[in-house]
Image (spheres, rainbow, N blue to C red):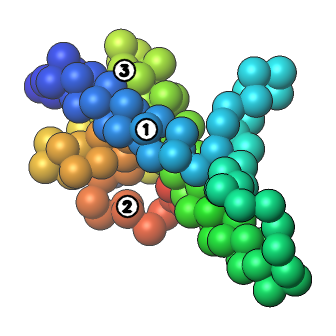
Amino acid sequence: MLDKKKIKEKLESERDVLLEQMKGLGRLNEETGEWETTPEELEFPESDENDKADRFEDFEARSSMMKPLETRLSNILKAIKGINRESFGKCEVCKKDIEMTRLEVNPAARTCKKHLDSISEES
Ligand SMILES: [Zn+2]
């Protein structure tokens, strides 16, 4: 029997940690519900082209950090939503309970360890 309460707490704290990280990288667009990466706050007015290029690279780096966080957040939100469903914590492939040890590491897991590679966690 899965300890859903414990899993839910874990999911919620993970969600909060993720949100904090994402807030450091960008902001949530209230209209689209999507996260947008924002460039680092400017401390000095742009001085030369080199500076601009650096900031652009930095922005790229920030966007590429944001994407996996966004994917993870959406998995977690889905898991929180579905936690009271009968199917929660069951492998999408074999329909058996997902190992508690696996859920502890990744509460948003959708498959058991055996079927780890069967479903992309990104989707
Ligand atoms: Zn399975």
Question: What residue is shown at x 27% (from left), y 23% (from top)?
Answer: 8
Residue 30, percent across and down? Answer: 75, 21
- Disc 2 C-beta below 8 A from ligand 1: yes
- 53 lies above or below 122: below
Q: Secondary structure at mark 2?
A: helix
Q: Whole-percent x and y of residue 33?
A: 74, 27
At 37% from the left edge and 61% from the top edge, which residue is drawn? 115
Nearest to N terminus: mark 2 or mark 3: 3
Q: Inspect the image, locate mark 1, and give the three-letter code of the amino acid beneath it.
A: Glu
Label 3, secondary structure: give it. loop
Dot label at residue 88: none
Q: Quadrant of the N terminus?
A: top left
Residue 41 can be seen, yes or no: yes
- Asked whether, in this view, residue 18 is left or right of residue 62, the answer is left
Which residue is nearer to you in this view: 84 or 29?
29
Would residue 37 be found to the left or right of residue 96 on screen? Answer: right
Q: Return the mark for residue 83.
A: 3
**How crowded is the residue under tag 1: few (<14 C-alpha within 10 Å), some, or many (20+)?**
few
Image coordinates for residue 85, horizontal then vertical, percent? 40, 16
Which label is found at residue 115?
Answer: 2
**Quarter of the view holding residue 56:** bottom right
Crowding at dot 3, Cα within 10 Å, few <14 / some 14-19 / many 20+, comes out as some
Numbered tag placed on residue 20 in the rendering: 1
- Please state which amino acid type lies under the numbered disc 3: Ile
How far apart marks 2 and 1 lie (CA) works out to 31 Å
Could you tell me which residue is drawn at 66 percent across and 71 percent down?
A: 58
Residue placed most toward the observer, 9 or 113: 9
Compared with 46, 108 (above or below) is above
* Tally of numbered tags: 3
Q: Residue at x 64, y 45 (%)?
A: 26
